[in-house]
Image (cartoon, grey):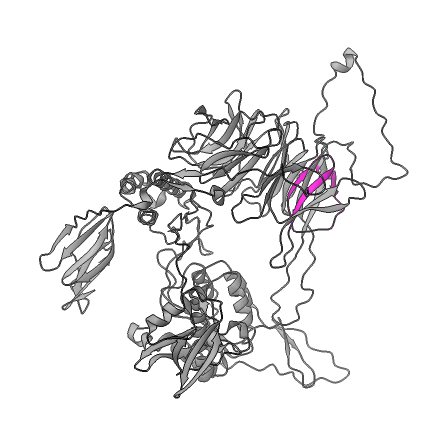
Amino acid sequence: MVAGDKLYFVSNQNGNDNLWVMSASGKNAKALTDFQDFPIKRASLDNGRIIFQHGADLKIYDIAKRRTRTLDIALSGDFPQLRDNWLTKPTKYLTSVDFNADNKQVILTARGRLAIASTDGKRLVEIDTPAASRSRKAILSHDGKWVYAINDASGEMEIWQFAADGSSERKQLTSGASISRWQLVLSPDGNKLAFDDFNGDLWILDINTGDTEKLYAGQTEMSPYADIVFSADSKLLAITTSKLGDERQRIYVHNFAENRGQVLTSDKYNSYSPAFSQDQQWLYFLSDREFTPTTRSPWGDRNMGTTFDRRTQIFAYALKADATFPFQKPTELTVQAEPEEDSDSEEADNAPEAPLIDWEQLTNRLWQVPVSPGNYSDLAANAKYLYVRDQVTEPGSKPVLKAIEQTPHHKTSTFMSGLSSYKLSADGKSMLMLKQSGNNDQIFIVGAGKQFPSDTTDQKADVSAWKLRIDPQQEWQQLFHDAWLMHRDYFYDKAMRGVDWAAMKQKYQPLVARITDRAELNDVLGQMTGELNVLHSQVYGGDTPQEPDRPAPASLGANLLQTDEGVQIASIYQYDNEVPAKASPLLKPGTDAKEGDIITSINARPINTLAELNQALLNQAGRQVLLGLSRNGEALQTIVYPVSNRTDARLRYQDWTTRNRQKVEQADQDIGYLHLYAMGSNDVSDFAREFYAAYKKDGLIIDVRRNRGGNIDSWILEKLLRKVWMFWTSGNREPNTNMQQTFRGHLVVLADQYTYSDGETFTAGVKAMDLGPVIGKQTAGAGIWLRGRNRLADNGMARVAELPVFAEDGRWITEGLGIAPDIEVDNLPYATFMGEDAQLDAAIEYLQQRIEQRPVKPLTPKAYPGVTEPADDIEP
């Protein structure tokens, strides 16, 4: 901000974001404010005064008077976001669902609240949970009298018991929690609750005595146990765990009577989803042990390596040494066991109970279910069937639930297609089914047979009566606490970087009482998490006001200019003209529009100004629009299909990259160019499209300026690390290299201050492995990775930085600093506005010099030796 000959700015040089001033030459910098509580935000200068946000207040610094004052603002209005409101479809916020088949009831957890719905017409019951609290993972007791849930009313995630009839009777079953808890599982006999926590510990709560016992420890922090499964008689427990040092998940089984357990599977294969047979003779599980390559050789265009689809198979451990495998075909040696006669003898009554697991040689009693491999998950078993979810990798395909008969013929049928989730009852007779739907309201309790029933009239849970009243101010307090708690537990540094996190809660919580809408809560959360000074602690989303009837803008995919003649098409967004689907609306086949044309009408409505054009295009995205044009004084008409603003943004980006590529090609045909918008699956597609079109060039520019991050850096780096060590050729055939399709030329990476997250990791990898120089500016400094799982009750997000990045020598890197370029080049604002790109120019110049100094040697075979001479050995 410039006023007179002074430059005003915000800096944290005195320990907090404050207002500073210095001369235009950059000298004599001094602080104008000295706030040590809240940082200054959104500073703006006008008429000798600087207005800024400080905490929840607006303040003005008067430059002439050198004085700061707080604006005394009293807003009047209805403040509709402060009023209680009703959610008519709470299941849109569904986070878990469980059921009681005998009572034909389902328990819903949504928006942190609980309700019981039924399939037989009984009333919907809202569970009375403490105000301003969030409940998670609710389950119903087997007698239907109680609901168990994880609830944070105490300030920590404790396990509670609530009356299932909606009355106020409730009880906190655990105490002393100091870390987040993940899951809650009720034993079939109704006496035990299993739960796990962020420390990687698995606990068993005895509901009758209230005693809690740690059953298993060592699960890798930051991940829940993938599975916690009781046997039908509640005497055995199986879990999927991944201990520190394990590369893959493993199956563990525990016998409560013996207080003994064993890890059954090795670390060689990923194993998960255990399921006991109804007779407890078998422990079924899934494991990824099939490796059929999707690509069978390294040849072929854009071959980035093979993958292994449909890797999962079904296995079983015989828990009893004499167990008969139900899938085994009978043989002549098979002995049909005679049914034992009932005995009333005292001797039989007093006989010791046989152990539930024959531990000796247990891991050697491994069987495989003879069905084809698939993309399986969520295995369950009853007396007749194995149930497993399968997913085809084709785009748009829906997951299916398969039912596999437990017979030697193992006939497999599709129970249902398009399921979201399912759960088998403890007795194996009923099944909870959640079908895919926009509102998560397709919930059924059906019989566990071979197929989903065609008539579900009496089997669908009626959730339509659930209308949830929301007290915004009460809910905002809970959301605030939840965000604070998740940062405490999930943050990568348990010491919170030296920040007194409890004090931060006390500091910012009073601001929550002053907010008037959900967006302001995000502002408070952003300020609080900002105290940790990490870029990946991000706050966004939530139940903000929506305007469903608001008209949607549309775009013609061009830069338009207001002229004296009217609205001119100044330039049309460019694209790869070999991919018509990516064309701007004005360049689509069948549309006759050119740069320089004047737009005279939209759907026969006269257009003279940009404002009139924008108004006429409202709600026209994807529709036929009659476009009137004037070209060199001649009137004409054409049909165009405008696009949404979101698509327009992608088209503008595409135009920028296309023009960059054209600039590079015009400067030097031996240099290639590609830009990575982010580091996700779409971006690896763009990489494959552009990299393999340029890998034979002598130079390559990979542009990650403004890259938004993701996680595919290693895929890109791997391709750049490939080296050519031999080649094939004969006659006039183009040499084929080994390694195939490898770039042999000189590389430059462009990065800037907006290169973010995984874009920075890629940049750092290029520097660390000396693949080429980085040109541009120092990157953003977001070096702590995250998982994006910190969702609040209203679907807002309070992302926590969880995974710090270290160099191979153990140094903490990137966060708060970024990755410095090898050659610093700045794109100055005015020059950039005028279309110049000093960074791209520098990259072209560097590569041209490098190619001249160290030209890429052609692959030229030497003459063949005589018939008696062997070939040469390879040299290192």
Instruction: Look at the image and say whether residue 255 sits in the magenta stretch.
Output: no
The location of residue 830, given as percent across then percent down, is 29, 75
Q: Which residues are magenta?
A: 363-390
In this view of the protein, which residue sits in the foreground, 870 or 223?
223
The location of residue 577, given as percent across then percent down, is 52, 78
Q: Look at the image and tell me whether residue 673 can be seen.
A: no
In which quarter of the view is residue 648 placed?
Answer: bottom left
Q: Is residue 813 above or below residue 100?
A: below
In which quarter of the view is residue 64 placed?
Answer: bottom left
In this view of the protein, which residue sits in the foreground, 301 or 747?
301
Q: Is residue 1 above or below residue 785?
A: below
Residue at the extreme top of the image, as rendered: 346
Position of the N terminus by quadrant? bottom left
Q: Is residue 119 above or below residue 709?
A: above
Residue at the extreme front of the image, as rendered: 604
Which residue sits at x=17%, y=61%?
A: 21
Position of the C terminus by quadrant? bottom right
Total numbered labels placed on residues in the image = 0
In this view of the protein, which residue sits in the foreground, 167 or 864?
167
Q: Is 70 situated left or right of 795 in this image?
A: left
Residue at the extreme left of the image, as rendered: 65
The location of residue 522, given as percent across then percent down, is 34, 48
In which quarter of the view is residue 130 placed?
Answer: top left
Q: Is residue 64 above or below residue 578?
A: above
The location of residue 152, given as percent across then percent down, is 41, 34
Instruction: Look at the image and say whether residue 388 sits in the magenta stretch.
Output: yes
Which residue sits at x=79%, y=13%?
A: 344
Q: Look at the image and tell me whether residue 703 can be seen.
A: yes
In this view of the protein, which residue sits in the foreground, 258 or 2?
2
